[in-house]
Amino acid sequence: MTPTTQESVKTDSPAVPFRKILVVDDEQGIRDLLSYELTSQGYHVTTAADGEEAVALVGKENFNVIISDVKMPKMDGLETLEAVKKIDPDVEVIMITGYGTIETAVTAMKAGAYDFVQKPFSNIQELFALVEKATEKRDLKALLAVYEASKAVFTSVRTEDMLSTVIGLTRRILRADDVSIMLPEEDGKFFRVAAQVGGRESRKDTRVALGERVAGKVALSKEPVIINGSIEKDSRFKGTEPMRAIKSAIVYPLVLNGQVLGILNANRIERDDPFGAVDLRSATIFGSQIAQALFNSKLFKELEDKASRLEEAYARLEEAQKQLVQTEKLAAIGQLAAGVAHELNNPLTGILGFAQLLLQEEGLTSQQREDLESIYKQSQRCRTIIQNLLQFSHRKDPRMEPIDLSPLIDDTLRLVQYDFKTSGVDIQVKIPKNLPKILADPNQLQQVFLNLLTNARQATDQKKGARIHVLVEAKEGALVVVFRDNGIGISPENVGKIFDPFFTTKPVGKGTGLGLSITYGIIQQHKGTIRAESELGQGTSFIITLPVVEIP
Ligand code: ADP
């Protein structure tokens, strides 16, 4: 039985053997005899009178087995064998030999022939058995190729890698001129060509709606179809305009657990022989493997997406936790600092007052005067620290107003310009025009910028080619302000401590360790964030985000 053209082929129908034999012999009598006998056995027989004709046929059609005479004019059996094997390495060739050509037949077997039979044929049953075995071997080879292909499919989980492997193999196994795979879009209502091999023009991104045209109908019915001949004459696809001339096509739904994961299209454009049940069997085996692989890569992608979402969430959580810890630390230290500062303020006022009084006394020795001045100076330093502490603990509520960041940064830079210039620090500022306004306390923000600029200046001290960049950009509903220097950087073990009150790496008298914790508190009151990125010896960036709010 042959698969009738334009007949819907169901996956669960038993595979119908459709085996094609090519008989090559220069003797008409032998051709007729073999043709008659083999046809009576259910084979489809084509004949060729010489090697050249045989080679031309093999180029256009697929044969399961070729039976070829050894001795022929023009092109002998051995040459024919080599030529057809070049076109179709999987085809099995049985040689026919007379008594005088046995040696040649043996040579032919060494060159890849399946077996040989002697003429005249004393027992035709023997030939049948040989042909049967040869076709089985050929089928086994095809199955083996499918098996190998499946292995290849399973080793690549990413859809893109897998698809390109799959369509190349499918084309080989089904002997198709072009192959493409369509994948469903998000909503499952459309299918789109995701990969293609062969064919003159690219059909990539060609879309078809579920239920429309051949692929859409196959996706809906979940039944594969073989279409032989023009689609216009096919009653199943009435009204479907052909997009191009296709001689034979297999359209195969890639189904797993009742879900259509894709559609496999294999077309023969140049080759004349139609797809048959054997091809459908290959497509069935292969299709189920592809469906499984598509399912796997879908899972893999979902897993990847989940993992990256988790990673993002984790990073956000970590940042939030850091900020929380910092806030708690600041609150605890703030209370303590307020108490200490308060307690120290009164005695310190006394020390300063008495030192001043004593300095006005007459008759002091120069040593006494020097000592008193020292007491006065050091006490004043203590007062500055206490003032800083009080500012840190009794953080005043910011007085928010709509402000333009650009002039505020310019004003701050003007304050430090002289100092920076004389120290040879190159300051570069990049602020885009028309930045949205933010709600902020300009004095407090200026204090933040001054802190960061002073730190950056100290970090780049003595450095040749010292550079500080101030960059602003509007991004995702916030203004991002970056202060970047190419100074000494911060060691990884210190980077987590710099916002802690009293943390300083500067020598006594140079740093209080309060600048960044005050900065941190101010930015927090502005509902913003601040973080540092640093590499020891390379430089540091402080990145501040300040939310842009609708200003009433
Ligand atoms: P201080 O400047 O008084 O030490 P801060 O709180 O302003 O206090 O800074 C804390 C510490 O953070 C500094 O001692 C220094 O180690 C580090 N630091 C801050 N800014 C920078 C920078 N731009 N480059 C390198 N280190 C920095």
Image (tube, rainbow, N blue to C red):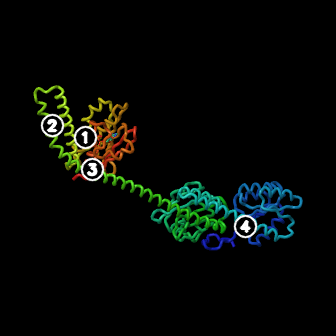
161 displayed left or right of 369: right
Q: Which badge, 3 or 4, is on the more N-terminal residue?
A: 4
Q: Position of residue 148 (x, y in %)?
A: 64, 60
Residue 430 visible here: no
Q: Amino acid at mark 3?
A: Leu
Q: Position of residue 171 (x, y in %)?
A: 62, 59
Question: SS at mark 1?
Answer: helix
Q: State the CA–CA distance, disc 2 to disc 3.
A: 29 Å
Q: Amino acid at mark 2?
A: Leu
Question: SS at mark 4?
Answer: helix
Question: SS at mark 3?
Answer: helix
Q: Amino acid at mark 4?
A: Glu
Crowding around mark 2 (Cα neighbors within 10 Å: few <14, some 14 to 19, many 20+) is: some
Residue highlighted by disc 1: 407
Residue highlighted by disc 4: 136
Q: State the CA–CA distance, disc 3 to disc 4.
A: 82 Å
Residue highlighted by disc 2: 352
Crowding around mark 3 (Cα neighbors within 10 Å: few <14, some 14 to 19, many 20+) is: many
